[in-house]
Image: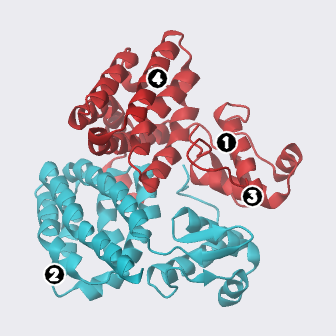
Amino acid sequence: MPVPVTEAVNPRRLIRDEVFARLLDAIVDGDLLPGEQLFDAEIEKWVGVSRTPVREALNQLAAMGLVEILPQKRTRVTPIDPVRLRGLLDTLGPLLEGVVRDSTPLLTDADKTALKEFAQRYTSDAPKQIKRDRLFTEGLINVYLRRLDNKTLARLATRHLPELRRAINAAPSDTFFTIGLPAFHSAIDASVAGDAETASAAIHEYWNEAVEQLVGEFAAADKKDD
Amino acid sequence: MPLPVNDTKPVERQLLRDVVYTRLYEGIIDGTLEPGETLLDDKLTAWLGVSRTPVREALMKLADIGLVEMAPNRYTRVAPIDLRAIDEAIYTTGILHVHAARTGVPSMDAATIARLEKASKEIKRHAKSKDLPALGVALNGFFLEFERSLDNAVLVAVSEGLSPQLLRYVTVWQLPFDTDDIPAKIAEISAAAKARDGEKAAELIRDLYEPARRQFFDEYRRSDAEIDANPIV
């Protein structure tokens, strides 16, 4: 499978991964802005590596929807497009519902403790703190993905969640956060209680309400710009 | 074929990388390049008549969808057949197809219905002649219609990315979907779509994919101790 668990340590691989990780963080955190043009030479200088690992990292980011490469023309950070964002969310939503439904009966006591800790941190006065916390979104979902043990599903989530996290970081307001609170907590509570159907229904509700709000805000902001 | 080279887009200048990608993709799917076969840059550049860069880029894309394995400075090879990966891909596409059917079928256009019916007939024909590779292609095409009807580029790309696992390995399925009457099941799904009954279509697809999901838990998922010792994420 595409993500080999054991791999020989290799200098070239490490350099590419390093470039990739730095660009990924910069894009997701908004240090590189949506639509911002990227120049190979500048990245090479910034990270201090040669062209090949930079191109490889950019190709990888392009496959994740975070970078747009127009050969012979330009490379830029993908702008946040409400249509694409909706498509992304309409893909991740059903996958995560499936993951939560199928992994909830399998959760161990340690998993449940971890979920409860996430729930405690997700309160109405926490949005700003959680927004930038890359371990929150992925960390929480990873509890379910890990227990399910389906590498294909985990790979898809790992690939597409950063694009969602970028949108959350760039969200025009924190409203989606507040709106999503009740459904989020029902999902965690049901998971801890081992109730798979209720947990996955709550994820569905969270997606319909909070995520709908998020996409709506981007669409409204887009309209205002026109 | 899952590659987006069909009717929807105007013809764009094809990148060398994409040409190489297509050639290698097809070579792997049809078995010209065998599972486990080592891929040497020199041989590939000679075979395809292009330079190293597009070859490397195409190989990385193929590694991305699990058709090629790259261990830097050790080997690049056609990914060996991995039954667990196949099962996981079917399990995962099942989730997406169910979702696509439920949300897309109620407003599905007549042209898509016509394509479903056509694919359904092809499936019947290929099943009768036991042409497994052709059956795989037809089944894959049938189900992708549901995603393609939704106007969601991400969903289509993700589903297409899972297709090669299904396509390439269709010949090793002993009994695809654990039923000896796939054509009848497909015809039922097609009829539910024609009646614009999204719930019914979704339910039928879920039933069809259920054995693959079941198989994952029965045969491939590891024990909690193994998961905790070596977690996938």
How much space separates mark 1 and mark 3, taking CA atoms? 14 Å
Element type at mark 2: loop
- Say which amino acid is labelled 1: Tyr
At horizontal 51% and vertical 27% (from top left) the residue drawn is: B138
Element type at mark 1: helix
Whether callout 4 and callout 3 share a subunit is answered: yes
Compared to residue B151, the image places residue A179 above or below, namely below
B154 on left or right of B75: left
CB under 8 Å between discs 4 and 3? no
Category of crowding for the residue at label 2, using alpha-carbon neighbours closer than 10 angstroms: few (below 14), some (14–19), many (at least 20): some
> Could you tell me which chain the residue with mark 3 belongs to?
B
Chain that is cyan in the image? A
Pick the front one: B92 or B147: B147
> Could you tell me which chain the residue with mark 2 belongs to?
A
Label 3 belongs to which residue?
B56
The color scheme shown is by chain
How much space separates mark 1 and mark 4, taking CA atoms? 26 Å
Category of crowding for the residue at label 4, using alpha-carbon neighbours closer than 10 angstroms: few (below 14), some (14–19), many (at least 20): some
Pick the front one: A64 or B104: B104
Would residue B74 be visible to someone looking at this image?
no
Element type at mark 4: helix
Colour displayed for chain B in the image of the structure: red
Label 2 belongs to which residue?
A123
| Image disc number at residue B25 | 1
Would residue A2 be visible to someone looking at this image?
yes
Category of crowding for the residue at label 1, using alpha-carbon neighbours closer than 10 angstroms: few (below 14), some (14–19), many (at least 20): many
Residue A98: x and y in percent read: 28, 49
A55 on left or right of A140: right
Quadrant of residue A89 within the rendered picture: bottom left
Pick the front one: A109 or B3: B3
